[in-house]
Image (cartoon, rainbow, N blue to C red):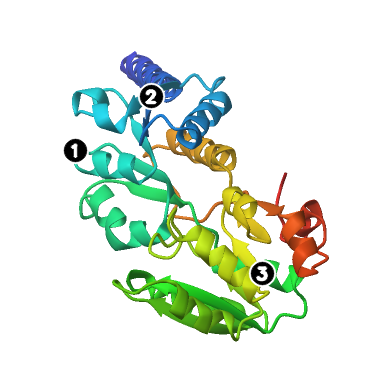
Amino acid sequence: MTAVVSRSRTEFLRIVRRMVACACLLLVSQQLAAAQVAIVLSDDSTPYQEVYQVVRAYLDDSGHEITRVYAANLTVAALSEPRLVVAVGVRAAESLAALPTRIPQLAVLVPRAWYLRTGRLRLSDGGRRVASAIFLDQPFERQARLIRQAFPGARRVGVLLGIEQDGLADELDEALRMQQLGLLHGTLGREEWLIAPLENVLSGADLLLAVPDPRVFNRDTAQSLFLTSYRYRVPVLGYSRSLTRAGALLSLHSSPGQIGRQTAEWVGQALNGMPMRLPPPAYPAYFSISINEQVARSLGFALPPEAELEKRLGGER
């Protein structure tokens, strides 16, 4: 009789443990399904809004709640509910990093140079919270492969860097050498005017690679840079569609919508994990190529179609 009672008690405890385990799993699944994500925008300009709209559209059926807040209005109270915060743009990331919170943080549409220089340390609070980023810039390896595909006769690629980003030259040189291309590198000093160092680069380059460097490319310098490169008959490879429209022969870039798609994929994966993990900082996974046909005709270049170049680089439309 005692053995029967013991077996019954054991079976009862086993059932109770299963019920508790199921309840815990149900609670966890409910928490995962109902997670809140805060999207912090640097301002209300179109690129930032597009990232937000794409993330929201991709996660619309996931059960997660997506909220939007602007950097100017960001407070600790605004982050009391979210399990993950996405900062869109440097201003949003700087505002987010300044708050005393342990919520995992993902910065997107930010330059890699900013992230490596200051963003990584500030967003992670010295390693005390989870942080990652999706960069605005394209990897040099991808740019080098595009140069080889679009300009098979090119031998030397010129680049002009501000003194703060001069360290990028070694990375670029390594990527170019893998495509049998040489680098002609110039540095723009803090108080130096653009034209002289630019002409030194253009005089020996087959192509000028534009890098997202505010010292070199900004509203005040862009027109002079394109006019000078045109005078030297040297095409420019840019990093945005707007640079293509402004005078670059072609550009390799990721749209806010493409960055938003990758962001949504990362957010979805992170929220489905226990504990939450973000992928390591990365370049954009999705990209596009734009060509200025008028500049191509003027400089005498016949390039493959945009879609063909994207396909050769392994891109998705």
Residue visible at 20% across and 28% down? 75
- Name the mark nearer the viewer: 1 or 3: 3
Q: Residue 235 location in percent, x, y?
A: 66, 69
The residue indicated by pointer 1 is 99
Name the residue furthest left. 100
Q: Seen in the image, is 201 located left or right of residue 24? A: right
> Of callouts 1 and 2, which one flags the residue occurring earlier in the amino acid sequence?
2
- Is 148 situated above or below 215? below
Mark 3 and mark 2 in contact? Answer it, CB < 8 Å: no
Q: In which quarter of the image is the N terminus?
A: top left
Q: Which amino acid does label 1 sit on?
A: Leu
Q: Which amino acid does label 2 sit on?
A: Arg
Q: Residue 280 location in percent, x, y?
A: 43, 54
* C-alpha span from label 1 to label 3: 44 Å
Residue visible at 72% across and 55% down? 291
Specify whether residue 142 is in view. Answer: no
Q: Residue 129 location in percent, x, y?
A: 25, 46
Please give the label number shown on residue 252: none
Q: What residue type is labelled 3?
A: Pro
> Of callouts 1 and 3, which one flags the residue occurring earlier in the amino acid sequence?
1
Quarter holding residue 152: bottom right
The residue indicated by pointer 2 is 68
Please give the label number shown on residue 235: 3
Question: Quick one: 69 or 247, which is closer to the camera?
Answer: 247
Q: Seen in the image, is 209 located left or right of residue 311? A: left
Residue visible at 53% across and 22% down? 62
Q: Describe the element under mark 1 as helix, strand or loop.
A: loop
* C-alpha span from label 3 to label 2: 41 Å
